[in-house]
Amino acid sequence: MPEINSIRISVSEAARLFGIDPKTVRRALKAQELRYIVVRGRYKLHFESLVKWSQKKPTVKNKSDKFGLGQYVEKWKINNKHYSPNPKQLEK
């Protein structure tokens, strides 16, 4: 059954987002470690499978944290406690 709301990205977009070489993504495709579809002769990777794969591979996770999206996580944290989640609500 096709996934209607799934996010799909290209090999080059995946490489940029995760701070890795496109060859690394292509090796994962060849090893059938990622879910994808082919649109007009181009791979479109399922973003969810890409994230899961990146977290299983220590080298990819480390590069993502240093050179990819992970480098921005600290900057994205909400510092204003007025808008942060209430810890008491999180416990429920």
Image (cartoon, grey):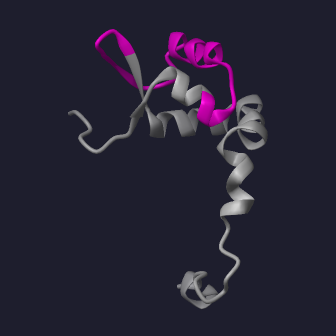
Horizontal arrangement in the rendering, residue 3 relative to residue 59 (left or right): left
x and y percentages locating residue 43 in the rendered image: 40, 17
Depth check: give the residue in front, 22 or 37.
22
Q: Position of residue 29 (x, y in %)?
A: 51, 15
Does the segment drawn in magenta span residue 15? Answer: no
Residue 13 or residue 7, whichever sits in front: 13
| Residue sitting nearer the eye, 22 or 33 | 22
Considering every residue shown, the one lying at the far left of the view is 1
Q: Residue at x 60, y 36 (%)?
A: 17
Check the picture and name the quadrant holding the N terminus: top left
- Picture layout, residue 67 above or below residue 39: below
Q: Please state which of residues 77 and 3 is positioned toward the viewer in this rendering.
A: 77
Give the magenta part as a residue range.
Answer: 16-42
- Kindly indicate the quadrant of the structure image that contains residue 80: bottom right
Q: Could you tell me which residue is drawn at 51 percent across and 21 percent down? A: 11
Residue 28 is covered by the magenta coloring: yes
Label tally: 0
From the top left corner, tell me how far across and down residue 5 is, in percent: 28, 45
Q: Quadrant of residue 63?
A: top right
Q: Is residue 91 left or right of residue 7?
A: right
73 left or right of 31 in image: right
- Where is 42 relative to 72, above or below? above
- Picture residue at 63% right of the left edge, 86% below the top: 87
Left or right of residue 67, residue 9 in this image: left
Q: Within the image, what quadrant is residue 86 found in? A: bottom right
